[in-house]
Amino acid sequence: MKYYILFGPPGAGKGTQAGAMVETWNLCHLSTGELLRAEIAAGTPLGLQAKALIDAGNLVPDEVVEGMIESKFNSVKDVNGFLLDGFPRTTAQADALGAMLERRGESLSGVVSIMIPDAMIYDRIRHRAEIEGRADDASDAIVRNRIDTYHAKTEPLISYYRARGLYHEIDGTGTIDEVRARIFALLKTL
Ligand code: ADP
């Protein structure tokens, strides 16, 4: 099984690019943000707990997302691998993922990191807010908090995975097609 992490700041285009990647390589797309939004929409206890944190641009507790990921690893069949989108987001989550994979006798195939400058994050999220209406896209203050959270808690994963020889960065600026071509060229090598 292949296990890829799709990495990058909020608004880098992870969700946009994931579709073509999972189709071409027969992967299961696991977006913790999407899974959490589904819990909120269904009004589950977990969704109720997560909603206030997400709407303010904060992370939900590590155990919550780790549990969601492991249950998908255990239940999803008939795929060649998993594309993790938005997970891990902290080094504690990365350690937990490493332990999960080890228990399964598996290992990470690589981290595909889509990088864009902070200024572009605002433009892309403002555009998405008009289309999707996500509460956490609605105000600049919340987006600023998400970017700050990314720099403080998630960016350390770059050196974490670089030290393990698993980190691969591509330029996330340009058109959707241009970025997809860069990702596909990389994925063929992982
Ligand atoms: P984006 O890529 O635009 O940041 P996501 O859909 O990945 O958005 O995530 C939306 C929100 O869901 C995050 O801001 C956070 O509150 C929560 N979330 C998603 N994944 C995680 C995670 N791995 N750990 C903690 N919180 C998470």
Image (spheres, grey):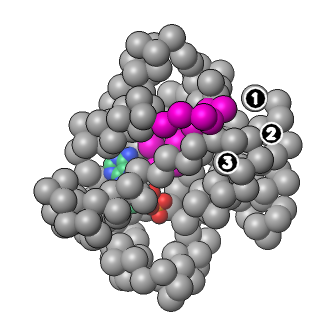
Residue where numbered disc 2 is placed: 186
Name the foreground residue: 169 vs 19: 19
**Residue 25 lies in the magenta stretch:** no
Amino acid at pointer 2: Leu
State the CA–CA distance, disc 2 to disc 3: 14 Å
Name the foreground residue: 116 vs 107: 107
The image shows residue 64 at horizontal and vertical percentages of: 25, 43
Q: Is residue 98 left or right of residue 183?
A: left
State the CA–CA distance, disc 3 to disc 1: 15 Å
**Residue 86 lies in the magenta stretch:** yes
Quarter of the rendering containing residue 179: bottom right
Q: Quadrant of the C terminus?
A: top right
Mark 3 or 1 closer to N-term? 3
Q: Name the main secondary structure of what is drawn in magenta.
A: loop
- Disc number lying in front (3 or 1): 3
Quarter of the rendering containing residue 73: top left
Answer with the quadrant where ligand 1 appears in the image.
Answer: bottom left
Quarter of the rendering containing residue 27: top right
Q: Secondary structure at mark 1?
A: loop
Residue labelled 3 has its Cβ within 8 Å of some atom of ligand 1: no
Residue at point 64%, 64% (across, down): 16
Residue where numbered disc 1 is placed: 190
Q: Secondary structure at mark 3?
A: helix
Tell me the crowding category of disc 3: few under 14, some 14 to 19, or many 20 or more residues within 10 angstroms, Cα based: some
Residue 146 appearing in the image: yes
Specify start and end residues of the magenta stretch as a single range.
76-88
Residue where numbered disc 3 is placed: 22
Callouts 1 and 2 close, C-beta under 8 Å: yes
Tell me the crowding category of disc 1: few under 14, some 14 to 19, or many 20 or more residues within 10 angstroms, Cα based: few
